[in-house]
Amino acid sequence: MKSGLLPFLVALLLLGACRSREPRFPVEHVSLKGATVIDNGLLGWSASDIQALFTDVLRDSRRFELLSEDAPERSEPGSWSFTLELPFTREALKDGGTYSFAEVGATLVMERRSGEGTQRYQVVGLGEVRVEAKDAEARRKALREALRRGLVQLADAARLQLAAVGRPDGALVMDLQSPDERVREFALRVLAERRNPAAAPLLIRQLQDEDLQVARQAMGALVEMKESAAVPALIELVKERDVGFMQEVVFAIGEIGGAEAEAYLFTVAQGHDQPDVQAAAQQALDTLYAAHKLATPEARGTDRAEH
């Protein structure tokens, strides 16, 4: 054997050993939903064809243990249920180019139930392939390949998200500095779910995201954490937004509570150029006052002498 091959073979063996130690996530059920999956003339595949492709992708990743394949009735503690949906399958032009691209969006919801409740995470994938010809066969071939690529993205994102779920808080805090945006995002999700204070600064930053869905998710996580440091940023968020979103933010401020939140809600409830926002502030303030009242010993029926 040539001496130059030895380091290469050693590296391959070490890589294989590392992969063998990576966890495999048990999946007890894989299902599909949505009209795009059930009836899709562009793909020309049935729902069972799409499910078979997704199952192959999960199996080929070697990171998921498909329990239903081994034994249909088999289940084990900590196993996940996967639900796949395809929000869209389409062709689109890119930057005024002459070629169109087949695009398939994929969404995967992962759920796990236990005595402590239900864990639920969602990841997305997008497959894109250039359509090389205008005939129906070429277009269908491109769309199917776009689907496959989207599902590969989805499986990789699912792997990263479930890996984050199994990591301790200290490791997740370190993951917030990862150069991989997905690792940072999934670590943040889990830290927020665990109400770890380390998640708060990044969530507050996400409130300013141009994508309202990102801002809403961050706001919801901050409400769950009862993060009072988020109140000033939420107050700023009320400005120059549509009325419906402003109402959401006002209610979020009320849910977090605290002296600053209460003072702000009182001011808005006294007068605002949007009557619906003013009414929302009054409702949130009333809820806060009711919570204060219920928190007193008298409201709880507790004898003061016990304290």
Image (spheres, rainbow, N blue to C red):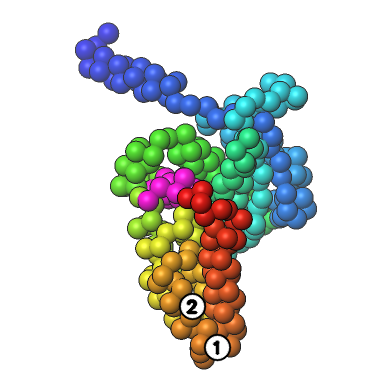
**Toward the viewer: 291 or 9?**
291
Classify 59 as above or below 145: above
Tag on residue 274?
1
Which corner quadrant of the image does residue 178 belong to?
top left
Tag 1: residue type?
A: Gln
Dot 2 falls on a residue whose secondary structure is helix
Q: Which residue is mark 2?
A: 265
Q: How many marks?
A: 2
Q: Is residue 190 magenta?
A: yes
Closest to the observer, 211 or 35: 211
Residue extending farthest to the left is 3
- Give the crowd class for mark 2: few <14, some 14-19, many >=20 residues within 10 Å: many
Q: Residue at x 37, y 51 (%)?
A: 197
Task: Residue at 69% x, 21% y: name it.
Answer: 70
Residue placed most toward the observer, 290 or 116: 290
Where 154 falls versus 5 (above or below)?
below
Mark with earlier residue (1, 2): 2
Task: Indicate the position of residue 1 as horizontal and vertical percent values.
Answer: 27, 8
Residue 67 in picture, x, y percent from top left = 66, 26
**Residue 139, percent across and down?**
64, 55
Task: Select label 1 or label 2 by which is in front.
Answer: 2
Residue at 21% over, 12% down: 3
Position above or below: 281 against 193: below
260 sits left or right of 1 in the view = right
Name the spot of residue 6 as percent of width and height, x first.
Answer: 26, 14
Q: Is residue 137 visible?
A: no
Write down the quadrant of residue 65 in the picture: top right
Q: Which stretch is magenta?
A: 184-197
Q: Is residue 275 magenta?
A: no
Q: Is residue 201 left or right of residue 157?
A: left
Please state which of residues 169 and 66 is positioned toward the viewer in this rendering: 169
Asked whether the residues under the numbered discs 1 and 2 touch, taking CB atoms below 8 Å apart as contact, a structural biologist would say no
